Image (cartoon, rainbow, N blue to C red):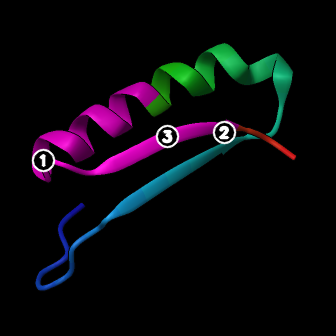
Amino acid sequence: MRSEGRRVTSVTVWIADDERRAVVEAIEGELIAKLREAQPGLEARVLPGP
């Protein structure tokens, strides 16, 4: 997950399937933690799917 010369400033994760919400939330939590570790100050949030 490296991109030379680019900086991620915001990440939004949409959870579209309520039946898989717990699994997606766990994966999302790990993803956001790793992104924040790689880039402190990253704004990241989870929104319910449309």
| Mark 2 in CB contact with mark 1 (< 8 angstroms) | no
At label 2, the amino acid type is Leu
Decide: few, some or many residues near mark 1? Use Cα within 10 Å; few <14, some 14-19, many ≥20: few
Q: What element carries label 3?
A: strand
Q: Is residue 23 left or right of residue 18?
A: left
Question: Furthest-bottom residue in view?
Answer: 5
Vertical side of 31 occupied by 9: above or below: below
| Mark 2 in CB contact with mark 3 (< 8 angstroms) | yes
Residue at image coords 12%, 47%: 40
Vertical side of 4 occupied by 2: above or below: above
Residue 33 in the magenta stretch? The answer is yes
* 3D distance between C-alphas at marks 2 and 3: 7 Å
Residue 36 in the magenta stretch? The answer is yes
Residue at image coords 18%, 49%: 41
Q: In which quarter of the image is residue 23?
A: top right
**Residue 44 location in percent, x, y?**
41, 45
At label 1, the amino acid type is Pro
Decide: few, some or many residues near mark 3? Use Cα within 10 Å; few <14, some 14-19, many ≥20: few
Residue, disc 2 = 47
Residue, disc 3 = 45
Q: In this view, does 36 lie to the left or right of 16?
A: left
| Mark 1 in CB contact with mark 3 (< 8 angstroms) | no
Q: Earlier in the sequence, mark 1 or mark 3?
A: 1
**Residue 39 location in percent, x, y?**
14, 53
* 3D distance between C-alphas at marks 2 and 1: 21 Å
Q: Is residue 31 left or right of residue 4?
A: right
**Residue 17 location in percent, x, y?**
83, 31
Residue, disc 1 = 40
* 3D distance between C-alphas at marks 1 and 3: 14 Å
Vertical side of 9 occupied by 46: above or below: above
Q: What stretch is highlighted in magenta?
A: 29-47
At label 3, the amino acid type is Arg
